């Protein structure tokens, strides 16, 4: 693989090891961060500005906390696009608001650059190991060009669609896992306060949809096949939810997520889906 010149902007907990993996892959990486300490710690060639990092580069990569930071780093005074050669790749690996990603993509393209959004999943340990999951939004040809860089930072690259779709995939994924985290925490507290041994509760839940997840069990078998014939009726799900909420109220266990779910199930019942499979919730919410 020929050596490429890469400008890397954002050398934090994730960005620093990602940039080092590009160096270990044989590329010339010039790094910039607002923190001089972060620049020194990353071990890249240091740059005095985003523009300096991009000067003559084949590719610029941003890994920053917010969309405004990405815009400033690329398009502001001293921004990368002042020096980046036209036609070069701009790869934003930040996790930002997808509608801002659309704005960044449009601005980059209007200035004559190719754009890929490629936010990452997994942890800083995976960043160190070059084993991130990368969700890429890009035109097919641009993604193929970007793979020479992305494959050094991640071992799983999913093409999510056109520019902006990687950002959407990241937010959808995080929404599901972040909200599910509350449900898991509530369930385990409910187990403890009701007197159930926590290890027993975990063992039981791991053997059912509770622990295995709807995307691995019920949805592929039912609603995603267009089948909402009841395997477990929505009416019964609501009944059991009410029992759990009553128990929690009596033993003073928090059920914020459960309380929020109840009116949605009640809406499903009111809309005539009570005797359908509980995965008909997808159809219900699609129709709202």
Image: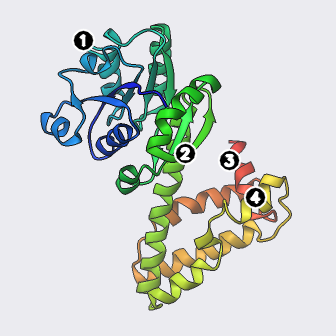
Residue 252 percent location from the top left of the image: 39, 79
Helix, strand or loop status at disc 3: helix
User: Which numbered mark, 3 or 4, is in the foreground of this view?
Assistant: 4
Q: What residue is pinned by disc 4? A: 220
Residue closest to the eye, 245 or 57: 57
User: Which numbered mark, 2 or 3, is in the foreground of this view?
Assistant: 2
Q: How far apart are marks 1 and 2 (CA)?
A: 33 Å
Of the numbered discs 2 and 3, the one sitting upstream in the chain is 2
Q: Is residue 114 visible?
A: yes
Residue drawn at point x = 54 percent, y = 29 percent: 164
Residue 243 percent location from the top left of the image: 59, 79
The relative height of residue 168 versus residue 130 in the rendered view (above or below) is: above
Q: What residue is pinned by disc 3? A: 285
Q: For this view, does 195 lie left or right of residue 70?
A: right
Q: What residue is pinned by disc 1? A: 77
Q: Distance between the residues labelled 3 and 1?
A: 44 Å
**Labels 3 & 1 near each other (Cβ < 8 A):** no
Q: Callout 3 environment at 10 Å: few (<14), some (14 to 19), or many (20+)?
A: few
Q: How far apart are marks 4 and 1 (CA)?
A: 49 Å
């Amino acid at each position: 693989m020929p050596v490429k010149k890469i400008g890397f902007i954002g050398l934090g907990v994730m960005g620093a090891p990602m940039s080092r993996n590009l160096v270990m892959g044989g590329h010339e990486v010039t790094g910039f961060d607002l923190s001089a300490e972060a620049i020194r710690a990353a071990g890249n060639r240091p740059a005095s500005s985003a523009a300096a990092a991009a000067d003559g580069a084949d590719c610029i990569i941003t890994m920053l906390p917010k969309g405004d930071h990405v815009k400033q780093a690329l398009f502001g005074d001293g921004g990368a696009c002042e020096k980046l050669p036209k036609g070069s790749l701009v790869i934003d690996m930040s996790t930002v608001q997808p509608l801002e990603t659309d704005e960044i993509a449009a601005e980059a393209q209007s200035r004559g650059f190719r754009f890929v959004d490629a936010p990452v999943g997994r942890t800083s340990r995976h960043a160190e190991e070059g084993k991130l999951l990368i969700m890429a939004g890009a035109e097919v040809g641009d993604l193929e060009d970007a793979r020479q860089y992305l494959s050094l930072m991640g071992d799983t690259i999913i093409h999510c669609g056109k520019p902006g779709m990687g950002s959407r995939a990241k937010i959808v994924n995080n929404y599901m896992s972040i909200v599910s985290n509350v449900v898991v925490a509530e369930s385990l507290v409910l187990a403890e306060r009701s007197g159930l041994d926590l290890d027993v509760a975990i063992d039981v839940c791991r053997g059912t949809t509770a622990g295995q997840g709807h995307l691995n069990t019920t949805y592929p078998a039912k609603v995603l096949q267009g089948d909402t014939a009841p395997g477990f009726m929505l009416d019964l799900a609501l009944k059991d939810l009410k029992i759990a909420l009553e128990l929690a109220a009596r033993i003073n266990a928090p059920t914020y997520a459960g309380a929020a779910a109840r009116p949605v199930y009640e809406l499903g019942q009111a809309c005539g889906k009570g005797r359908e499979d509980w995965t008909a919730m997808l159809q219900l919410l699609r129709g709202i």
